[in-house]
Amino acid sequence: MTNNPRVPTNLIPTKITQLPLADTPTASDTTIVVQGGITKRATLGQFIGVIGPTGPTGVTGPTGPTGAASTVAGPTGATGATGVGLQGPTGPTGVAGPTGPTGVQGNTGEKGPTGAASTTVGPTGPTGGVSTTPGPTGPTGATGAVSTTPGPTGPTGAASTVVGPTGPTGNAGNNGPTGPTGAASTVAGPTGPTGATGADSTVAGPTGPTGNAGSNGPTGPTGAASTTVGPTGPTGPTGATGANSTVPGPTGPTGTAGSSGPTGPTGAASTVAGPTGPTGPTGAVSTTPGPTGPTGPTGAQGTSSSLFLYLANTLATSGYPNDGDILWNNATQTSATQINVSHLTDNNIDIDIFLSLLSVGEQIIIQSQTSSSSYQKWNISGTPTNVNPGAANSYWTYPVTLAGSGGAGTTGFANGAALFLALVNGTTGPTGPTGPTGAASTVAGPTGPTGAVSTTPGPTGPTGAVSTTPGPTGPTGAVSTTPGPTGPTGAVSTTPGPTGPTGAVSTTPGPTGPTGAVSTTPGPTGPTGSAGGAGSTGPTGPTGPTVYPGAGVVVSTGSAWGTSLTAPAGALVGTTDTQTLTNKWVQPRVLASTANSATPTLNTDNYDIMVITGQSVAITSFTTNLTGTPVNGQKLWISITGTGAVGITWGASFSSSTVTLPSTTVTTNRLDVGFVWNVAASSWRCVASA
């Protein structure tokens, strides 16, 4: 307890840790004491007089120096007597000593009296776990007032398996509408009883309907066929000849074809062969091989070619052409009779062994690397010579004659032009002799195709014997162009014949009918006649006043004056005029690209600057999608910003100068590269890189 009063040592109670701390004690409060080993009850008032007043707190002595940390825990000292005096300030927390042994549990004290009921509601304890044992049912509450609002309908209960009691019979309902008439009964109902006989009627009743006809009786058997022909009836008298019919009768059937006339005499033997008969069937496959045919002529020798990169050297016509160059011994290249080729290609490959394979009769083809239509084709006309063999300036000379050219190859390749050199090896050898004719074949060859139909008839064969079997009826003959004799006039028909076809339109106008009476209704308006010729030119009118357009540069719409433009202070600029421009600024054409392409697209006719940003893939060629027709000295600027270090391959359309083409960007820094078009080398020459 806080602020415990001083009590005799033998009255200190055993601490019961489960009891709560007391509030401010009073003299009537009861506590537990142990006297002579016996637990007893006492009030705090009994301790008054035994416990003296609290003395003043002594002066706190100075804190001694802290000793070195002990490595051995000292024994716990005995508990000193409780001092009497006010509680001093709390000292610093000492080092925790070891926990002493647990004392013997004291005896349970007597149950104290029940305290007065508390007037303060204690805090609600925590909710207990859900009970698994139902508690007792509480008492039924009072019945509430009748609700004026119906509660929600509860869910429908499960279907009852017990039949409920039958409810009382309800009142009879109204009659429903009459149902449809049922189908006719197939079973006759019972006959009703016969009514009483009425008195005889004095009025005749109506005649009843006629009964249904009875069914036909069975057909009798067919009689036997008659074996006697009945007599022919007499021929009636011939009627009088009718008037001529105005309707042509139907055409009679075609008469039977006449018999064939006798065969004419056999003609003289023909001097012209008749047509070849049809090809007979193909014979069985021969089991004997036919003779070997003659050996054909020897074919031309095959060729091969090798392709190498060179540059044109037009600054010299003899001697060593320089590494990677070709020169001609005539400034007019197509008139050259010798070509000198360095043993090193433009990409510094030594092809001495390939150049040594060329010989008389083979070809050299020189072509522009950028256009296959610019070429020169040369035949080697003399023995090639290797000058300075094995040396760094080794080269080959080839005596040549021009076999063909095109494009820049005809006009002459420019100095430094990028070229292909194709070495075409292999010449055509002479035709070998024809082999001997093989022995005659003993196996018939296949039948040749049927010849063309002869346009000259062959001779007529001899007349055959007279047939005893009539031949088939020939086709109906052509319609006779000569009318047969007129038959007798038939009797007048009582049935009109069919209407004949409409006759052709007459080309001769019929007679004009009489003039009709004058119409009182105007006829329709006729079509408008064609326009008449132009009339003569009228007299010239007076000259009108002269009207000038507004001041400035005149604008015409073609049919009227437009609004004039403000005239500049200086001269107008012409597209083909030689003029000096001052105080002018030409805005460059900029292409901004975020396409992130490995082969960027650029047309140098449309743009002067290309700015590429966000490039993450390596650029494999700037040449692939490069288009345009640049002019000498034209400038081009390309900037590239990558998402990191991005590799760059420029391709054949770009070349280094004293400034080397960059091959990569640096992290995410912007790379700027400047170019000038070199017309001699047909490439964009790098002049700046930053």
Image (cartoon, rainbow, N blue to C red):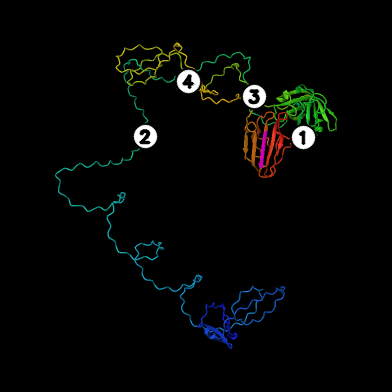
Highlighted range, magenta: 636-641
The disc, 3 or 2, on the residue closer to the chain's N-terminal end is 2
Three-letter residue code for mark 1: Asn
Label 1 sits on residue: 347
Cα gap from disc 3 to disc 1, whole angstroms: 45 Å
The disc, 1 or 2, on the residue closer to the chain's N-terminal end is 2
The disc, 4 or 1, on the residue closer to the chain's N-terminal end is 1
Vertical placement of 102 versus 646: above or below?
below
Residue 22 at x, y = what percent? 53, 78
Q: Residues within 10 Å of mark 1 (few under 14, many from 20)?
A: few
Where the C terminus falls, by quadrant?
Answer: top right
Q: Evaluate whether residue 439 shows in this view.
A: no
Vertical placement of 396 versus 492: above or below?
below
Local secondary structure at mark 4:
loop
Label 3 sits on residue: 579
Residue 384 at x, y = what percent? 82, 27
The reply to whether discs 3 and 1 touch (Cβ–Cβ < 8 Å) is no
The reply to whether discs 4 and 3 touch (Cβ–Cβ < 8 Å) is no
Cα gap from disc 3 to disc 2, whole angstroms: 133 Å
- Magenta region, main secondary structure: strand
Three-letter residue code for mark 3: Gln
Label 4 sits on residue: 476
The reply to whether discs 1 and 2 touch (Cβ–Cβ < 8 Å) is no
Q: In the image, what residue occupies the spot 17% across and 50% down?
A: 197
Q: Is residue 662 magenta?
A: no
